[in-house]
């Protein structure tokens, strides 16, 4: 009898793998990047919210009898864009699993684990591409021109655009090479205590914030790379429909083959920003990472997703 892949095991293993990886990056970013689920119909979700009221509280003259100043209340619309993903048809010979002494359950679990990791990697890359593009669209939130290596001093400078709200930056996101440069800066420090911490304890200066290290292509900029300083829930990746897993045996060839395919969708929501309706639906990752496809909706930039340090 030909090997039969168990869809239940594939789905369960993929789900478990997703949950483990999601917990890792949600914890690693102190909640700056989150992955959740919400059924979203259509290609885009538009939400209206109250805009910040400028100078809401002011001094009151207790001796005056003039009319009070009327402050208008307005709303803003933010679009959450939906992207559709799929594995394509994955096909292999049924005999391959049996040749290596495994069974259908173990083979199903192995496939499910790969699918789960692939889904998380795609979702994380999409989320990072989106939030980097959004912040990059605001020149005042970007520090550096991609020509200097990262240092704790430059990380500190990158927080300046948030002023007294810089405490809302909860984590930094950077690639592996950039993190190595940051550790190297600590090792080269003239302070023996800082250098000792970097060499013997693996500690490096990140201004008291966790550093999430990922070699996501979404961190690439025109020159150099981005170090993201993100606020809580800066980007939400929302699984917007149930994942579909389909499998079948394919006969009629010299060897019986097994084919499996899965698909689903994510919605991307970046704090304080909106996907431009004119930019279309179901965008590619390249389009998601293009800053001109996004627009700032937050009245105060300091209540948005965060800042960028553009370093070497």
Image (spheres, rainbow, N blue to C red):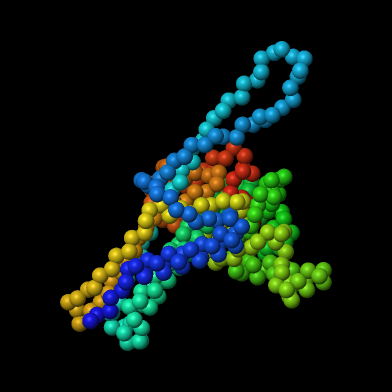
Q: Position of residue 122 (x, y in %)?
A: 45, 62
Q: Residue furthest left?
A: 252
In the image, taking residue 249 as reference, residue 198 lies left or right, namely right
260 in relation to 30, above or below = below
Looking at the picture, tell me which residue is in the foreground, 80 or 39. Answer: 39
Quarter the C terminus occupies:
bottom right
In the image, taking residue 77 as reference, residue 148 lies left or right, namely right
Q: Quadrant of residue 101?
A: bottom left
Tally the numbered discs: 0
Q: Position of residue 158 (x, y in %)?
A: 68, 53
Looking at the picture, tell me which residue is in the foreground, 273 or 98. Answer: 98
Q: Residue at x 48, y 37 (%)?
A: 48
Quarter the N terminus occupies:
bottom left
In the image, taking residue 45 as reference, residue 176 lies left or right, namely right
16 in relation to 101, above or below = above
Residue 264 visible here: yes
In the image, taking residue 216 as reference, residue 143 lies left or right, namely right
Q: Residue at x 56, y 59 (%)?
A: 26
Q: Residue at x 68, y 59 (%)?
A: 209
Residue 184 visible here: no
Q: Residue at x 65, y 70 (%)?
A: 180
Q: Position of residue 19 (x, y in %)?
A: 48, 63
Looking at the picture, tell me which residue is in the foreground, 182 or 204. Answer: 204
Q: Quadrant of residue 249?
A: bottom left
Q: Quadrant of residue 15?
A: bottom left
Q: Position of residue 224 (x, y in %)?
A: 59, 61
């Amino acid at each position: 009898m030909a090997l039969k892949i168990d869809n239940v095991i594939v789905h369960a293993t993929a789900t478990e793998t997703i949950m483990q990886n999601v917990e890792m990056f949600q914890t690693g970013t102190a909640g700056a990047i989150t992955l959740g689920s919400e059924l979203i119909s259509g290609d885009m979700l538009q939400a209206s919210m109250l805009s910040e009221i400028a100078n809401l509280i002011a001094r009151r003259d207790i001796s005056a009898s003039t009319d009070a100043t009327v402050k208008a209340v307005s709303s803003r619309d933010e679009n959450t864009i939906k992207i559709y993903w799929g594995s394509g048809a994955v096909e292999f010979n049924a005999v391959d699993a049996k040749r290596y002494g495994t069974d259908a359950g173990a083979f199903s679990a192995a496939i499910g684990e790969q699918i789960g990791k692939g889904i998380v990697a795609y979702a994380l890359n999409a989320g990072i591409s989106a939030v980097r593009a959004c912040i990059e669209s605001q020149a005042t939130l970007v520090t550096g021109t991609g020509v200097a290596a990262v240092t704790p001093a430059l990380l500190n400078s990158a927080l300046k655009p948030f002023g007294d709200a810089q405490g809302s930056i909860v984590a930094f996101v950077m690639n592996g090479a950039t993190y190595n440069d940051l550790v190297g800066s600590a090792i080269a420090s003239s302070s023996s205590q800082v250098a000792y911490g970097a060499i013997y304890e693996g500690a490096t200066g990140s201004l008291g914030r966790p550093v999430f290290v990922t070699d996501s292509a979404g961190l690439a900029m025109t020159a150099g790379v981005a170090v993201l300083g993100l606020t809580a829930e800066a980007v939400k990746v929302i699984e917007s429909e149930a994942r579909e897993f389909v499998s079948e045996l394919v006969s009629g060839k010299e060897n019986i083959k097994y084919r499996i395919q899965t698909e689903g969708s994510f919605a991307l929501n970046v704090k304080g920003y909106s996907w431009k309706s004119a930019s279309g639906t179901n965008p590619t990752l390249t389009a998601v990472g293009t800053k001109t496809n996004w627009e700032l909706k937050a009245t105060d930039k300091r209540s948005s997703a965060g800042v960028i340090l553009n370093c070497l």
